[in-house]
Amino acid sequence: MKKAIITGGSCFHHGLFNAVNGKFASMFDDRIYLPALHTAELSGFDCVVIASRLNLDFLLQNAQKLEDYLKSGGNIVSFGEVLAPYLPHICFSESEVNFWWWIHEGADLPLYAFEPQHSIWKYLSVKECKWHYHGTYDVDKGCEKILVDELGRSVLYKDSCHFKGTMYVTSLDPDYHIGQGFMPTTIPFLEKFMQWIETDIERSKNAKA
């Protein structure tokens, strides 16, 4: 499976590829520099990851390109907040971030598997999804809620109902924390999450064949 990741020039984007002896450098077949996204050919990739904390102006300039990729059967993974309409059919609400819940003995971050039998939980545990999150997504009917907060709002969901392709959307930001060198649980999260993404895309392809 051929995968690309869209990144900017920030230090944590570079840090992602240098972390863990280059583990994540080999995860992607290509790195697309955001200011050059308008010239990139996305059709050759099975999956395109949009890294967190990217420049919104550049993303908005490429909104139609990203939507066309989804309509043609491409698959997009979006990390972090979606603070502008560069991806379609997304409704994001920012929330206060609880950075320090884990310093209190016995504390927990209220995140839950919406459906414990979902295929993602064969790869990940809910515990590996817990560091903090930056908001929630309201999802349309037909989308799959995967990880939710205590009010049932989506922190991670899958949208395969609007396009020929699929969007995997989460307000979690593992790439940022790996690149910055803290929040160690983000390392197994990203590794296992991308394993599930690949399996899910292949399963979808086989089902449509």
Image (cartoon, grey):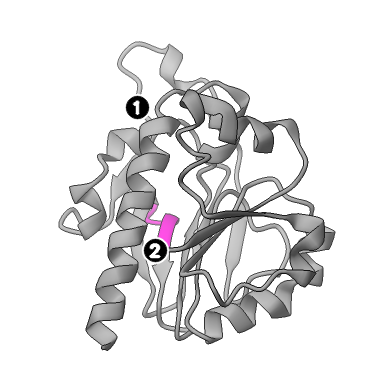
| Other-residue count near label 1 (Cα within 10 Å), few / some / many at <14 / 14–19 / ≥20 | few
In this view of the protein, can residue 149 be seen by the observer?
A: no
Asked whether 38 falls inside the magenta stretch, the response is: no
Query: In this rendering, would 96 be left or right of 27?
Result: right
Residue at numbered disc 1: 108
Q: Quadrant of the C terminus?
A: bottom left
Quarter of the figure with residue 9: top right
Q: Position of residue 46 (x, y in %)?
A: 46, 70
Residue at x-position 39% and y-position 74%: 143
Foreground tag (2 vs 1): 2
Q: SS of the residue at dot 2?
A: loop
Q: Position of residue 158 (x, y in %)?
A: 40, 66
SS for dot 1? loop
Magenta span of residues: 150-157
Residue under label 2, please give it: 1
Q: CA distance from mark 2 to mark 1?
A: 36 Å
In the image, 138: left or right of 128? right
Give the image location of residue 75, x and y in percent. Answer: 48, 71
Q: Residue at x 52, y 20 (%)?
A: 100
Of 87 and 108, which appears nearest the observer? 87
From the viewer's side, name the closer residue of 54 and 41: 41
Q: Quadrant of the N terminus?
A: bottom left
Residue type at mark 1: give it: Asp
Q: Is residue 91 placed above or below 101 in the rendered structure?
A: below
Q: Quadrant of residue 197?
A: bottom left
Q: Magenta segment: does it hold 152?
A: yes
- Can residue 33 be seen in this snapshot? yes
Task: Indicate the quadrant where residue 180 lies.
Answer: top right
| Sequence-wise first label, 2 or 1 | 2
Query: For the point 62% across and 83% down, which residue is it?
Result: 68
For residue 53, the mark is none
- Amino acid beneath label 2: Met
